[in-house]
Image: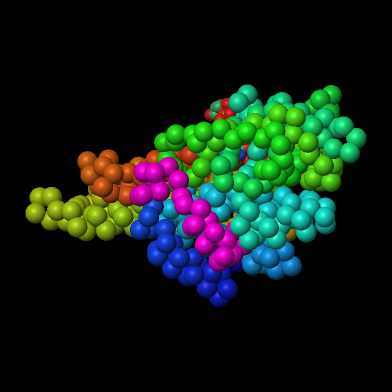
Amino acid sequence: MDFHLNEDDLMIKETAREFAEKRLLPNAQEFDEEDGMPQQLIDEMAGLGYLGMMLPEQYGGLGLTTVSFCAAMEEICAACAGVGILMSVQNSLCCEIIYRFGSDHLKEKYLPKMASGMVGSYCVTEPNAGTDVAGISTQAVDKGDHFLINGTKTFVTNGGQAGIFIVFAVTNPAAGNKGLSCFAVEKGFPGISIGAKEKKCGMRASDTREVSFLDVKVPKENMIGDPGAGFKMALTILNSGRIGVSFQSIGIARAALEEAVKYSKERKQFKQPIANFQAIQFKLADMATDLDAGRLLAYRAAQLKDEGKNIVREASMAKLFCSQMANFVVNEAVQIHGGYGYMKEYPVERYFRDARVCELYEGTTEAQKMTIARDLLKE
Ligand SMILES: Cc1cc2nc3c(=O)[nH]c(=O)nc-3n(C[C@H](O)[C@H](O)[C@H](O)COP(=O)(O)OP(=O)(O)OC[C@H]3O[C@@H](n4cnc5c(N)ncnc54)[C@H](O)[C@@H]3O)c2cc1C
Protein backbone atom coordinates (compact mmCIF):
# COMPACT_ATOMS: atom_id res chain seq x y z
CA MET A 1 0.00 0.00 0.00
CA ASP A 2 1.29 3.43 -0.95
CA PHE A 3 0.90 5.52 2.17
CA HIS A 4 2.19 8.93 3.11
CA LEU A 5 0.84 12.00 4.90
CA ASN A 6 0.24 14.81 2.40
CA GLU A 7 0.94 18.50 3.02
CA ASP A 8 -2.53 19.14 4.44
CA ASP A 9 -2.23 16.20 6.88
CA LEU A 10 1.18 17.43 8.00
CA MET A 11 -0.12 20.94 8.55
CA ILE A 12 -3.04 19.67 10.66
CA LYS A 13 -0.63 17.46 12.63
CA GLU A 14 1.74 20.37 13.28
CA THR A 15 -1.08 22.68 14.39
CA ALA A 16 -2.40 19.99 16.74
CA ARG A 17 1.08 19.43 18.12
CA GLU A 18 1.51 23.14 18.89
CA PHE A 19 -1.89 23.24 20.61
CA ALA A 20 -1.19 20.04 22.55
CA GLU A 21 2.22 21.18 23.74
CA LYS A 22 0.92 24.57 24.82
CA ARG A 23 -2.51 23.77 26.27
CA LEU A 24 -2.54 20.06 27.18
CA LEU A 25 0.93 18.87 28.10
CA PRO A 26 1.47 21.36 30.96
CA ASN A 27 -1.97 20.51 32.44
CA ALA A 28 -2.32 16.77 31.80
CA GLN A 29 -1.08 15.77 35.24
CA GLU A 30 -3.53 18.15 36.90
CA PHE A 31 -6.45 16.89 34.79
CA ASP A 32 -5.49 13.36 35.86
CA GLU A 33 -5.30 14.26 39.54
CA GLU A 34 -8.50 16.30 39.48
CA ASP A 35 -10.49 13.74 37.46
CA GLY A 36 -11.50 16.09 34.68
CA MET A 37 -10.81 18.86 32.21
CA PRO A 38 -12.21 22.42 32.40
CA GLN A 39 -15.19 23.42 30.23
CA GLN A 40 -13.08 26.35 29.03
CA LEU A 41 -10.72 23.90 27.33
CA ILE A 42 -13.61 22.18 25.52
CA ASP A 43 -14.84 25.59 24.34
CA GLU A 44 -11.37 26.45 23.14
CA MET A 45 -11.09 23.17 21.25
CA ALA A 46 -14.49 23.77 19.67
CA GLY A 47 -13.28 27.22 18.53
CA LEU A 48 -10.32 25.56 16.83
CA GLY A 49 -12.56 23.05 15.04
CA TYR A 50 -11.59 19.96 17.03
CA LEU A 51 -15.20 18.99 17.74
CA GLY A 52 -16.26 18.71 14.09
CA MET A 53 -13.09 17.79 12.28
CA MET A 54 -14.49 15.49 9.59
CA LEU A 55 -17.83 17.24 9.12
CA PRO A 56 -18.23 19.19 5.89
CA GLU A 57 -17.92 22.98 6.13
CA GLN A 58 -21.65 23.17 5.31
CA TYR A 59 -22.25 21.93 8.88
CA GLY A 60 -19.57 24.08 10.48
CA GLY A 61 -16.90 21.36 10.36
CA LEU A 62 -13.33 21.46 9.07
CA GLY A 63 -14.08 19.00 6.25
CA LEU A 64 -10.95 16.95 6.95
CA THR A 65 -10.18 13.40 5.89
CA THR A 66 -9.98 10.58 8.43
CA VAL A 67 -6.21 10.50 7.85
CA SER A 68 -5.85 14.18 8.83
CA PHE A 69 -8.09 13.65 11.85
CA CYS A 70 -5.90 10.72 12.94
CA ALA A 71 -2.72 12.76 12.52
CA ALA A 72 -4.21 15.33 14.92
CA MET A 73 -5.46 12.60 17.31
CA GLU A 74 -1.94 11.23 17.74
CA GLU A 75 -0.67 14.65 18.82
CA ILE A 76 -3.55 15.33 21.22
CA CYS A 77 -3.31 11.85 22.78
CA ALA A 78 0.47 12.03 23.16
CA ALA A 79 -0.13 15.08 25.39
CA CYS A 80 -3.34 14.05 27.17
CA ALA A 81 -5.16 10.90 26.09
CA GLY A 82 -8.17 11.72 28.29
CA VAL A 83 -8.83 14.83 26.20
CA GLY A 84 -8.23 12.68 23.11
CA ILE A 85 -11.14 10.38 24.00
CA LEU A 86 -13.54 13.28 24.15
CA MET A 87 -12.40 14.24 20.66
CA SER A 88 -12.56 10.67 19.39
CA VAL A 89 -16.09 9.95 20.68
CA GLN A 90 -17.30 13.33 19.42
CA ASN A 91 -15.87 13.03 15.90
CA SER A 92 -15.67 9.32 15.11
CA LEU A 93 -18.89 8.21 16.76
CA CYS A 94 -21.39 10.98 17.50
CA CYS A 95 -20.92 13.42 14.61
CA GLU A 96 -20.30 10.57 12.21
CA ILE A 97 -23.45 8.59 12.97
CA ILE A 98 -25.68 11.65 12.47
CA TYR A 99 -23.79 12.67 9.34
CA ARG A 100 -23.87 9.20 7.77
CA PHE A 101 -27.29 7.98 8.80
CA GLY A 102 -29.31 10.95 10.09
CA SER A 103 -32.04 12.75 8.13
CA ASP A 104 -31.29 16.17 6.59
CA HIS A 105 -33.38 17.66 9.38
CA LEU A 106 -31.22 16.05 12.11
CA LYS A 107 -28.01 17.00 10.33
CA GLU A 108 -29.08 20.64 10.05
CA LYS A 109 -30.42 20.70 13.60
CA TYR A 110 -27.49 19.12 15.45
CA LEU A 111 -24.26 19.02 13.44
CA PRO A 112 -23.53 22.79 13.42
CA LYS A 113 -24.17 22.89 17.17
CA MET A 114 -21.87 19.92 17.72
CA ALA A 115 -19.10 21.40 15.59
CA SER A 116 -19.32 24.60 17.63
CA GLY A 117 -19.20 22.98 21.06
CA MET A 118 -22.16 20.72 21.86
CA VAL A 119 -20.49 17.55 23.12
CA GLY A 120 -21.91 14.13 22.23
CA SER A 121 -22.02 10.82 24.11
CA TYR A 122 -22.44 7.43 22.46
CA CYS A 123 -24.68 5.25 24.64
CA VAL A 124 -24.62 1.54 23.85
CA THR A 125 -23.25 -0.27 26.92
CA GLU A 126 -25.57 -1.21 29.77
CA PRO A 127 -24.90 -2.86 33.14
CA ASN A 128 -25.83 -6.26 31.64
CA ALA A 129 -24.81 -5.76 27.99
CA GLY A 130 -21.27 -4.87 26.94
CA THR A 131 -19.69 -7.05 24.25
CA ASP A 132 -23.16 -8.45 23.54
CA VAL A 133 -24.54 -5.26 21.98
CA ALA A 134 -27.72 -7.00 20.85
CA GLY A 135 -28.42 -7.88 24.50
CA ILE A 136 -29.31 -4.31 25.50
CA SER A 137 -32.59 -3.84 27.35
CA THR A 138 -33.24 -0.08 27.07
CA GLN A 139 -36.68 0.19 25.45
CA ALA A 140 -38.04 2.80 23.05
CA VAL A 141 -41.79 2.37 22.80
CA ASP A 142 -43.68 3.90 19.86
CA LYS A 143 -46.35 6.29 21.20
CA GLY A 144 -47.56 7.70 17.88
CA ASP A 145 -45.79 11.04 17.46
CA HIS A 146 -42.91 10.20 19.82
CA PHE A 147 -40.96 7.34 21.42
CA LEU A 148 -40.78 6.81 25.17
CA ILE A 149 -37.30 5.70 26.24
CA ASN A 150 -36.59 3.79 29.46
CA GLY A 151 -33.30 2.24 30.49
CA THR A 152 -29.81 2.75 31.89
CA LYS A 153 -26.55 3.18 30.01
CA THR A 154 -23.25 2.69 31.78
CA PHE A 155 -19.63 3.82 31.25
CA VAL A 156 -20.84 6.74 29.14
CA THR A 157 -17.84 8.78 27.98
CA ASN A 158 -18.48 12.57 28.08
CA GLY A 159 -21.58 11.73 30.18
CA GLY A 160 -21.38 14.87 32.31
CA GLN A 161 -20.41 17.19 29.47
CA ALA A 162 -22.79 16.00 26.77
CA GLY A 163 -25.50 18.15 25.25
CA ILE A 164 -26.65 15.23 23.10
CA PHE A 165 -26.81 11.49 23.73
CA ILE A 166 -26.79 8.99 20.88
CA VAL A 167 -28.92 6.25 22.44
CA PHE A 168 -29.41 2.70 21.22
CA ALA A 169 -32.66 1.07 22.33
CA VAL A 170 -34.92 -1.87 21.55
CA THR A 171 -37.92 -0.88 19.40
CA ASN A 172 -38.98 -4.43 18.47
CA PRO A 173 -38.17 -7.01 21.16
CA ALA A 174 -39.23 -9.92 18.91
CA ALA A 175 -36.75 -9.06 16.13
CA GLY A 176 -33.43 -9.82 17.90
CA ASN A 177 -30.58 -7.65 16.64
CA LYS A 178 -32.88 -6.30 13.92
CA GLY A 179 -35.07 -4.80 16.65
CA LEU A 180 -32.60 -2.11 17.79
CA SER A 181 -32.91 1.55 16.77
CA CYS A 182 -30.89 4.67 17.44
CA PHE A 183 -31.99 8.10 18.71
CA ALA A 184 -30.59 11.60 19.16
CA VAL A 185 -31.62 12.55 22.69
CA GLU A 186 -31.05 16.09 23.90
CA LYS A 187 -29.79 16.57 27.45
CA GLY A 188 -32.71 18.92 28.10
CA PHE A 189 -35.41 16.30 27.42
CA PRO A 190 -37.14 15.63 30.79
CA GLY A 191 -36.42 12.28 32.48
CA ILE A 192 -32.63 12.01 32.00
CA SER A 193 -30.49 11.53 35.10
CA ILE A 194 -26.73 11.70 35.01
CA GLY A 195 -24.85 9.65 37.60
CA ALA A 196 -21.72 10.53 39.55
CA LYS A 197 -18.35 10.59 37.79
CA GLU A 198 -16.79 7.11 37.75
CA LYS A 199 -13.48 6.83 39.60
CA LYS A 200 -11.20 5.29 36.99
CA CYS A 201 -7.74 3.74 36.91
CA GLY A 202 -6.63 5.91 34.00
CA MET A 203 -7.89 8.34 31.34
CA ARG A 204 -9.05 10.37 34.29
CA ALA A 205 -9.32 13.62 32.37
CA SER A 206 -12.21 11.94 30.56
CA ASP A 207 -15.67 12.09 32.16
CA THR A 208 -17.37 8.67 32.46
CA ARG A 209 -20.84 8.25 34.00
CA GLU A 210 -24.01 6.23 34.16
CA VAL A 211 -26.92 7.87 32.33
CA SER A 212 -30.54 6.82 32.98
CA PHE A 213 -33.63 7.48 30.93
CA LEU A 214 -37.02 7.43 32.67
CA ASP A 215 -40.02 7.96 30.38
CA VAL A 216 -37.98 10.27 28.16
CA LYS A 217 -40.17 11.56 25.31
CA VAL A 218 -38.16 11.63 22.10
CA PRO A 219 -39.76 13.06 18.93
CA LYS A 220 -40.09 10.51 16.12
CA GLU A 221 -37.95 12.70 13.87
CA ASN A 222 -35.03 12.12 16.29
CA MET A 223 -34.60 8.51 15.21
CA ILE A 224 -31.26 8.19 13.40
CA GLY A 225 -31.53 5.89 10.38
CA ASP A 226 -34.28 3.35 9.84
CA PRO A 227 -36.23 1.53 12.55
CA GLY A 228 -34.41 -1.73 13.32
CA ALA A 229 -31.10 -0.54 11.80
CA GLY A 230 -29.52 0.33 15.15
CA PHE A 231 -27.37 -2.79 15.56
CA LYS A 232 -25.91 -2.51 12.06
CA MET A 233 -25.24 1.21 12.47
CA ALA A 234 -23.64 0.70 15.90
CA LEU A 235 -21.18 -1.80 14.42
CA THR A 236 -20.50 0.28 11.29
CA ILE A 237 -19.73 3.38 13.33
CA LEU A 238 -17.60 1.39 15.77
CA ASN A 239 -15.21 0.78 12.85
CA SER A 240 -14.50 4.52 12.85
CA GLY A 241 -14.26 4.54 16.62
CA ARG A 242 -11.72 1.74 16.50
CA ILE A 243 -9.48 3.81 14.26
CA GLY A 244 -9.81 6.58 16.86
CA VAL A 245 -8.81 4.22 19.69
CA SER A 246 -5.87 3.02 17.58
CA PHE A 247 -4.58 6.59 17.50
CA GLN A 248 -5.21 7.04 21.23
CA SER A 249 -2.97 3.99 21.69
CA ILE A 250 -0.38 5.35 19.27
CA GLY A 251 -0.30 8.76 21.00
CA ILE A 252 0.17 7.22 24.45
CA ALA A 253 2.84 4.79 23.18
CA ARG A 254 4.76 7.51 21.36
CA ALA A 255 4.82 9.69 24.48
CA ALA A 256 6.01 6.72 26.57
CA LEU A 257 8.75 5.87 24.07
CA GLU A 258 9.97 9.49 23.98
CA GLU A 259 10.13 9.57 27.78
CA ALA A 260 11.96 6.23 27.86
CA VAL A 261 14.58 7.39 25.34
CA LYS A 262 15.14 10.62 27.29
CA TYR A 263 15.36 8.87 30.66
CA SER A 264 17.70 6.16 29.40
CA LYS A 265 20.19 8.83 28.31
CA GLU A 266 19.95 10.71 31.62
CA ARG A 267 19.91 7.89 34.17
CA LYS A 268 23.33 6.59 35.12
CA GLN A 269 24.11 3.25 36.72
CA PHE A 270 27.52 1.59 36.86
CA LYS A 271 28.96 5.04 35.97
CA GLN A 272 27.25 5.25 32.58
CA PRO A 273 23.87 6.07 31.04
CA ILE A 274 21.58 3.03 31.10
CA ALA A 275 21.09 3.64 27.34
CA ASN A 276 24.54 2.07 26.92
CA PHE A 277 23.20 -1.30 28.05
CA GLN A 278 22.06 -3.61 25.30
CA ALA A 279 19.12 -4.80 27.44
CA ILE A 280 17.74 -1.23 27.38
CA GLN A 281 18.59 -0.68 23.70
CA PHE A 282 16.71 -3.84 22.71
CA LYS A 283 13.66 -2.69 24.64
CA LEU A 284 13.74 0.69 22.87
CA ALA A 285 14.17 -1.00 19.48
CA ASP A 286 11.18 -3.30 20.07
CA MET A 287 9.04 -0.42 21.33
CA ALA A 288 9.83 1.77 18.30
CA THR A 289 9.28 -1.07 15.83
CA ASP A 290 5.91 -2.03 17.30
CA LEU A 291 4.84 1.60 17.42
CA ASP A 292 5.64 2.07 13.73
CA ALA A 293 3.89 -1.18 12.80
CA GLY A 294 0.77 -0.06 14.69
CA ARG A 295 0.81 3.38 13.10
CA LEU A 296 0.98 1.85 9.61
CA LEU A 297 -1.90 -0.53 10.31
CA ALA A 298 -3.98 2.32 11.70
CA TYR A 299 -3.26 4.71 8.82
CA ARG A 300 -4.12 1.90 6.40
CA ALA A 301 -7.55 1.58 8.01
CA ALA A 302 -8.00 5.37 7.98
CA GLN A 303 -7.02 5.67 4.33
CA LEU A 304 -9.31 2.81 3.28
CA LYS A 305 -12.15 4.50 5.16
CA ASP A 306 -11.48 7.73 3.25
CA GLU A 307 -11.63 5.69 0.03
CA GLY A 308 -15.06 4.40 1.06
CA LYS A 309 -13.88 0.79 1.36
CA ASN A 310 -15.18 -1.84 3.78
CA ILE A 311 -12.86 -1.60 6.80
CA VAL A 312 -14.32 -4.13 9.22
CA ARG A 313 -11.21 -6.30 9.26
CA GLU A 314 -8.65 -3.50 8.93
CA ALA A 315 -10.19 -1.35 11.69
CA SER A 316 -10.31 -4.31 14.08
CA MET A 317 -6.74 -5.35 13.21
CA ALA A 318 -5.52 -1.80 13.85
CA LYS A 319 -7.38 -1.55 17.16
CA LEU A 320 -6.30 -5.03 18.27
CA PHE A 321 -2.64 -4.46 17.47
CA CYS A 322 -2.36 -0.83 18.58
CA SER A 323 -4.06 -1.30 21.94
CA GLN A 324 -1.84 -4.29 22.78
CA MET A 325 1.20 -2.46 21.42
CA ALA A 326 0.47 0.54 23.68
CA ASN A 327 0.27 -1.69 26.74
CA PHE A 328 3.55 -3.38 25.79
CA VAL A 329 5.28 -0.04 25.17
CA VAL A 330 4.10 1.64 28.39
CA ASN A 331 5.07 -1.42 30.40
CA GLU A 332 8.58 -1.35 28.94
CA ALA A 333 8.77 2.42 29.50
CA VAL A 334 8.02 1.87 33.19
CA GLN A 335 10.66 -0.89 33.31
CA ILE A 336 13.27 1.42 31.77
CA HIS A 337 12.44 4.02 34.44
CA GLY A 338 12.95 1.40 37.18
CA GLY A 339 11.26 2.34 40.48
CA TYR A 340 10.82 5.95 39.31
CA GLY A 341 8.46 4.71 36.61
CA TYR A 342 6.06 3.69 39.35
CA MET A 343 5.98 7.20 40.82
CA LYS A 344 3.61 10.00 39.80
CA GLU A 345 6.59 12.30 39.41
CA TYR A 346 7.22 10.73 35.99
CA PRO A 347 4.55 10.77 33.25
CA VAL A 348 5.06 7.10 32.31
CA GLU A 349 3.06 6.19 35.43
CA ARG A 350 0.04 7.96 33.88
CA TYR A 351 0.65 6.46 30.43
CA PHE A 352 0.73 3.02 32.07
CA ARG A 353 -2.74 3.61 33.55
CA ASP A 354 -4.15 5.37 30.46
CA ALA A 355 -3.16 2.63 28.00
CA ARG A 356 -5.05 -0.15 29.79
CA VAL A 357 -8.53 0.88 28.69
CA CYS A 358 -7.58 0.86 24.99
CA GLU A 359 -7.91 -2.95 25.15
CA LEU A 360 -11.36 -2.66 26.72
CA TYR A 361 -13.56 -0.06 25.09
CA GLU A 362 -15.04 0.06 21.59
CA GLY A 363 -14.74 -3.72 21.60
CA THR A 364 -12.39 -5.68 23.84
CA THR A 365 -9.28 -7.41 22.50
CA GLU A 366 -11.32 -10.63 22.37
CA ALA A 367 -14.11 -8.89 20.44
CA GLN A 368 -11.59 -7.64 17.83
CA LYS A 369 -10.30 -11.20 17.39
CA MET A 370 -13.85 -12.48 16.98
CA THR A 371 -14.51 -9.82 14.30
CA ILE A 372 -11.30 -10.52 12.40
CA ALA A 373 -11.80 -14.29 12.50
CA ARG A 374 -15.45 -13.98 11.40
CA ASP A 375 -14.37 -11.87 8.44
CA LEU A 376 -11.60 -14.33 7.51
CA LEU A 377 -13.84 -17.37 7.77
CA LYS A 378 -16.64 -15.97 5.64
CA GLU A 379 -14.32 -15.84 2.60
C1 LIG B 1 -13.44 4.15 30.47
C2 LIG B 1 -14.52 3.53 29.65
C3 LIG B 1 -15.26 4.30 28.78
C4 LIG B 1 -16.29 3.71 28.03
N1 LIG B 1 -17.05 4.51 27.20
C5 LIG B 1 -18.15 3.99 26.61
C6 LIG B 1 -19.05 4.82 25.87
O1 LIG B 1 -18.82 6.02 25.71
N2 LIG B 1 -20.16 4.25 25.35
C7 LIG B 1 -20.45 2.94 25.50
O2 LIG B 1 -21.47 2.51 24.99
N3 LIG B 1 -19.61 2.11 26.18
C8 LIG B 1 -18.48 2.62 26.74
N4 LIG B 1 -17.63 1.80 27.45
C9 LIG B 1 -17.98 0.41 27.62
C10 LIG B 1 -17.09 -0.55 26.86
O3 LIG B 1 -17.31 -0.44 25.48
C11 LIG B 1 -17.36 -1.94 27.43
O4 LIG B 1 -16.78 -1.95 28.73
C12 LIG B 1 -16.81 -3.05 26.56
O5 LIG B 1 -17.54 -3.14 25.37
C13 LIG B 1 -16.84 -4.41 27.26
O6 LIG B 1 -18.10 -4.66 27.82
P1 LIG B 1 -18.18 -5.12 29.36
O7 LIG B 1 -17.37 -4.18 30.17
O8 LIG B 1 -19.61 -5.29 29.69
O9 LIG B 1 -17.45 -6.53 29.38
P2 LIG B 1 -18.09 -7.96 29.01
O10 LIG B 1 -18.78 -7.89 27.69
O11 LIG B 1 -18.87 -8.45 30.18
O12 LIG B 1 -16.79 -8.84 28.83
C14 LIG B 1 -16.06 -9.37 29.94
C15 LIG B 1 -14.93 -10.24 29.36
O13 LIG B 1 -15.50 -11.34 28.61
C16 LIG B 1 -14.99 -11.33 27.27
N5 LIG B 1 -16.05 -11.77 26.37
C17 LIG B 1 -17.32 -11.32 26.27
N6 LIG B 1 -17.99 -11.98 25.32
C18 LIG B 1 -17.12 -12.87 24.78
C19 LIG B 1 -17.21 -13.86 23.74
N7 LIG B 1 -18.34 -14.03 23.05
N8 LIG B 1 -16.11 -14.59 23.48
C20 LIG B 1 -14.95 -14.39 24.17
N9 LIG B 1 -14.80 -13.50 25.16
C21 LIG B 1 -15.88 -12.73 25.46
C22 LIG B 1 -14.60 -9.87 27.03
O14 LIG B 1 -13.65 -9.75 25.96
C23 LIG B 1 -14.03 -9.49 28.38
O15 LIG B 1 -12.72 -9.96 28.49
C24 LIG B 1 -16.56 2.34 28.17
C25 LIG B 1 -15.79 1.56 29.03
C26 LIG B 1 -14.78 2.14 29.78
C27 LIG B 1 -13.99 1.27 30.70
Residue 327 image offset from top left, x and y in percent: 42, 42
Ligand 1 shows up in the quarter that is top right
Q: In this rendering, would 137 be left or right of 42?
A: right
Q: Which residues are magenta?
A: 29-53
Q: Residue at x 9, y 54 (%)?
A: 271
* Residue 60 visible in the shown view: yes
| Position of the C terminus by quadrant | top right
The one of 317 and 246 positioned closer to us in this rendering: 246
> How many labels, in total?
0
Residue 265 image offset from top left, x and y in percent: 21, 58
| 20 inside magenta stretch | no
For the rendered model, the colour scheme is: rainbow
* Residue 155 visible in the shown view: no
User: Residue most toward the right?
Assistant: 144
Q: Residue at x 58, y 38 (%)?
A: 156
Q: Give the image quarter of residue 238.
A: top right
| Position of the N terminus by quadrant | bottom right
| 39 inside magenta stretch | yes
User: Residue most toward the bottom?
Assistant: 7
The one of 329 and 35 positioned closer to us in this rendering: 35
Residue 29 image offset from top left, x and y in percent: 35, 50
User: Residue most toward the left?
Assistant: 271
Q: In this rendering, would 18 be left or right of 57?
A: left
Q: Residue at x 56, y 42 (%)?
A: 160
Q: In this rendering, would 365 be left or right of 163?
A: left
Q: Give the image quarter of residue 149.
A: top right
Asked if residue 7 is positioned above or below residue 286 in the image, the reply reads below
Residue 17 image offset from top left, x and y in percent: 45, 65
Asked if residue 308 is positioned above or below residue 364 in the image, the reply reads below
